[in-house]
Amino acid sequence: MTGDVAVLGAGMHPWGKWGRSFVSYGTAAARAALADAGIGWGDVQSVVGADTVRGGYPGYVAGATFAQALGWQGSRVTSVYAACASGAQAISTARAQILSGMADVVLVVGADAAPKGFFAPAGGDRPDDPDWLRFRLLGATNPTYFALYARRRMALYGETPEDFARVKVKNAAAGVLNPNARYRRAVSADDVAASAVVADPLRLLDICATSDGGAALVLSGMDFARRHGAANPVRVRAVSTVSPTYPRTVPDLPDIATDSAAAVAPAPVGFRESIARAAYEESGLGPEDLSLAEVYDLSTALELEWYEDLGLCAAGGAAGLLHDGVTALGGRVPVNPSGGLASFGEAVPAQAIAQVCELTWQLRGTAGDRQVPGARVGITANQGLFGHGSSVVAVR
């Protein structure tokens, strides 16, 4: 089933390291979204929570966790987990409930209180868990995975560490303008080059931090939005949560080997490219229609990969777009006008929701100094570990 749902409200708790429970960040974001929508908590018929797995038991039932924190009122509750794609799956679940007639108004919430440093798997022995295996067998932290992608781009397309640094410079300049961002300081290419090497060729400022934060959306059916007085709301038109197609022939941690292509030829479109393509097909739009994009820049090199996966350019053309200013504020298709993960850091269950918050504010024309003029169509993209696609198209 396809169709538009209205984004009546968007809210965030600023990113940082606040030292509190993820529940406090999520409820603050939820209250902000409800206030933005002009909706009372008692009017919400369903809560979809994106899980915070590292937060312990309450994170595994995030929908009920946030419903309880806001005050039990009988709403339907749902919890989803898809690593970095959790927020998109929460939006997809909410949209399905609205389009099927199960609910008129749904609150979507994600929040995290991330550990210091780089993410590691939960304790215990789990030899059937590829995330556990990549740490135990390879010692491969997330920056290792980011660096492998960077090295691959250098080998295939001749990109350089200086190209990667330009991404950080661009996103930091946007983050300065975002009051919800954790890092609000301009960064130069020299600053990136002077930061410590973490996983060659990536330096500390090439890699996103781990952060605390929360984001929330109030979604509704179009009829409800009109009755509520929202004649022309931002609308979610497509949500892609696709999985890979066998065989996968590009290494992609936490999997530590590729599928064999001896008997079955690889699909003509790779997994990451298929994420956005599915969203385009569902929305009836294409890359030529985009006003802006919010992508998961876990590292500077991975942002360049998304330019190609979104169809903004052909393979190997990403650095050219960056050099020409196409993806900067003021360019033809700004990418990460929020400042991206470079300015926020990862708050895993919240980030895909936060991306849609940014699209909402941009499409409303209320993004302040980082506003993309005349924004009408935006797309988000990220990839959750274990084969979770995530892309949302929003329009106005």
Image (cartoon, rainbow, N blue to C red):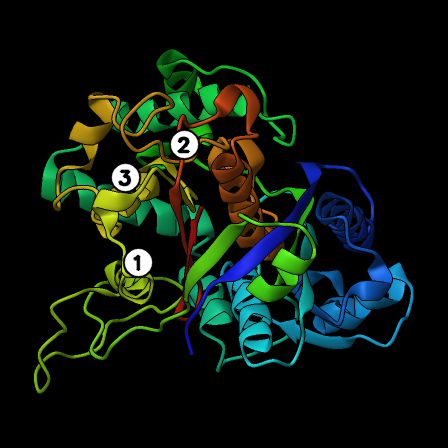
Q: Nearer the viewer, mark 2 or mark 1?
A: 1
Residue 276 has which mark? Answer: 1
60 or 101: which is nearer to us?
A: 101
**Extreme residue in the bottom direction:** 263
Task: Specify whether residue 160 is in view.
Answer: no
**Which residue is rendered at x = 36% and y = 19% of the image?**
193
Image vertical order of residue 395 relative to residue 198, above or below: below
* Label pair 3/1, CB-CB below 8 angstroms: no
Q: Mark 3 falls on what kind of element?
A: helix
Mark yes or no: residue 232 visible. yes
Q: How far across and how far down the image is residue 148, in percent? A: 29, 49
Q: CA distance from mark 2 to mark 1?
A: 24 Å
Mark 3 residue type: Leu
Q: In front: 361, or 215? A: 361
Numbered disc 1: secondary structure:
helix
Residue at figure coordinates x 51%, y 31% from the top left: 365
Q: Which residue is mark 2?
A: 206
> In this view of the protein, which residue sits in the foreground, 82 or 66?
66
- Location of mark 3 (residue): 304
Callout 2 secondary element = helix
Q: Residue at x 86, y 64 (%)?
A: 42
263 with respect to 241 (left or right): left
For disc 2, the neighbor class at 10 Å (few under 14, some 14 to 19, many from 20) is: many
Judge depth for marks 3 and 1 and give the one in front: 1
Report the amino acid beneath label 2: Asp
Q: CA distance from mark 3 to mark 1?
A: 15 Å
Crowding at mark 3 (Cα within 10 Å: few <14, some 14-19, many 20+): many
Under mark 1, the amino acid is Ala
Q: Name which quarter of the figure residue 138 lies in.
A: bottom left
